[in-house]
Image: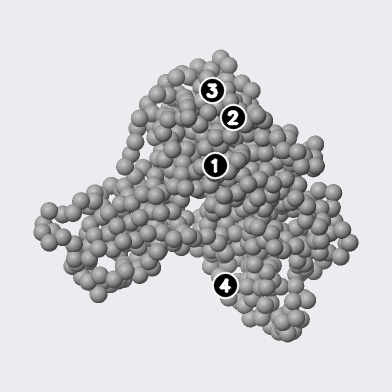
Amino acid sequence: MVAFDSNFVGIFSRFEGEICSLKRRRYCCNTDLIQKEHLSKKRFCKHLNGIFYSILVSLFTQVSFAQNDIADRENKFYQIISVPIPDSVKLEVGGLAFTDDDKLGVATRRGEIWVIEDPYQQKNRLPKYSLFASGLHEPLWLAQKNGAFYTTQRSELTKISDTNADGLADNFHTVYSWPISGNYHEYSYGPLILPNGNMLVTLNLSWVGRGESLTKWRGWMLQITEDGKMTPFATGMRSPAAFGLNKVGDIFFAENQGDWIGSGRITHLDQGDFAGHPAGLRWSGEPNSPIALKRSSFPDSAGLMFDYAKGKPNFKLPSIWFPHTVMGISTSAIISVNSDKFGPFEGQLLVGDQGHSKIMRAFLEKVNGQYQGACFPFREGFSSGILRMAWGSDNSLFVGMTSRGWASTGKDLYGLQRLKWDGKIPMEIKEMRITKDGFDLEFTKPVDQKMAASVSNYAMTGFTYSYHKKYGSPVINSRKCTIKKATVSSDGKTVKLDINGLREGYIHELKVDNLKSADGEEILHPKAYYTINSFPEGSVHDHHAMNHDNKVEVSGCGEDSQKSVREQPSDWKKGPDIIITMATKPGLKFDKELIEVRPGAKVKLIFNNNDDMLHNLVITTPGKGAEVGKLAMDMGLDGTNAGYIPATNSVLFHTCLIQPETSQTIYFTAPKAGDYPYLCSFPGHSFVMKGIMRVK
């Protein structure tokens, strides 16, 4: 089998990872736990031999029949290795931090801190887990400084020490505390330790049908000293779960889609900056606030963020937008690549995504003193929802994951994996720099000169999002750009694109088709998304062209109105035969997993979205629920405009994609007897948010 010859080494490595990923079984824990649970080493080996064949066959099948799968292609360059987790440890990762002696500290959402000895599995096949602390209130970060761990609980920044060196925490010191209202959405993150030793924390907004700052400093980034002195640093945040430093020490934070937030993004922050969400401005009048903007100055809909920010001091635009569902749905971690030991991307940022269980890559440059740049796909296929990342001493990247209540494409409830570069250079767009005439694309390898010089192999579309208090935004003002000329450098590593139609304040999608390296290797990720906040001096681009076509709105409700009838049909003289009321419940669930109707019944279905994110309800033909969910995931930029309702006969009836705290009613006649799956087709939700309409 050809696939065996070319992929054997990679398969063997993946076999190791697959074995260790079976973390819920007794044989995947450390030796002490094996002995404690009376599972002998002999029996342990027998278990491994017993599952070897089925796993190996599974991997060969994947290699033979899924060569085009992007995760398989990425695996040739960056391998995912699972770190074994004992069955007795529920490692819902909230934070990762290495100790001075190279042990890995892991904070969990269940309020524990575990210390993992030899997480690289260099000394033993199974790392050793030790419980260091427990009883914390959902710590969602972990840092280590001078022999102590630091973490944020819901209401405080805590320093946790082991004063008698017995391996157990015995001193819990409150460095700084803040009030909480008890709202479930009041997550806290940090600390990020700055080079001067000060610490940054961020505080989530509360959720009451919209993001609000119910208690002081919610929606803010705070700077805190070791002795507990706090300085408000910046605001305008909704759910700032991720923040980090680039190679030169500048601060970036990541934001998730929500009210006032059209899509995920990362933003460079200086002290006194405002990042876009107005709720935190409730505290801008405090004596120590560095921001003068007022909440009352924001209308419910402000057009385009780029236009609205003009003339407002310290209103910081996103450095890079991550188009929703195309690049991810929930940005969750930022880490800088500060070494050439992890491939050709030194100086760039890696950005995790919880919902899509993947890592993206961000290239940044300064134009007229402000950061902007491009994002690219990087590595998919992690086992759960990525929340935190940390560099190991061997230059591998540790990735901590959790998905309980936060659905993810990775099916496990939690996980710990390691991403390791195997030394081979992938064919990629390494950098995308704006020029006076368009963009310069620098590749990791010399390109095929003939292919790269053909303008037909490139396509670009500009688009943006509405800036309003509604949850998220569809793609608006989409317009194609014209690629006029492609010029290849003499060394074949740079292509200069001359482009008409670029717009300030817009995201620009680049598609590269039919392009290979000089030695015939296909480009691994042929798409990029560049955010233009400013053109270079002397640019030929029109700084104002089309910047005010910001009234475009779309229904977000699919193409076939007959599948989403929102008024009672006129021939229903006696009204509906049955009224079904559906709602949501925590954990991305419908409140009913089974509804029953008779064939031919006139059905009135009321869907109440009482969650804090966008949802729809889609009823499919028998056995097609998973297929429709996958089709919705693949809709790309067109998804929001269509409400993530794929144009397929497998969809029978559906609501629109509706805002949080709203409802919608649809009417339909029940089909013939059978089991009809229903789901929320918003990308990522369909894995868990589903049920069956039984017609009998």
Q: CA distance from mark 1 to mark 3?
A: 22 Å
Is residue 174 at least partly visible in the picture? yes
User: Circle 2 sits on which residue?
Assistant: 285
Residue ID at (81%, 57%): 171
Label 1: state its secondary structure: loop
Q: CA distance from mark 3 to mark 2?
A: 16 Å
Label 3: state its secondary structure: loop
Circle 2 Cα neighbour tier, 10 Å, few/some/many (<14 / 14–19 / ≥20):
few
Q: In front here: 545 or 187?
A: 187
Q: In the rendered structure, which disc, 3 or 2, sits on the residue that comes first in sequence?
A: 2
User: Circle 4 sits on which residue?
Assistant: 57
Q: What mark, if any, has residue 213 been given in the picture?
A: 1
Q: Looking at the picture, how far across and down is residue 447, in whole percent?
A: 59, 37
Mark 2 residue type: Gly
Pointer 1 with pointer 3, Cβ within 8 A:
no
Query: Along the horizontal axis of the image, is 373 left or right of 476?
Result: right
Q: In the rendered structure, which disc, 1 or 2, sits on the residue that comes first in sequence?
A: 1
Q: CA distance from mark 2 to mark 4?
A: 64 Å
Q: In front here: 281 or 265?
A: 281
> Which quarter of the rendered picture does the C terminus lie within?
bottom left
Q: Looking at the picture, how far across and down is residue 542, in whole percent?
A: 46, 18
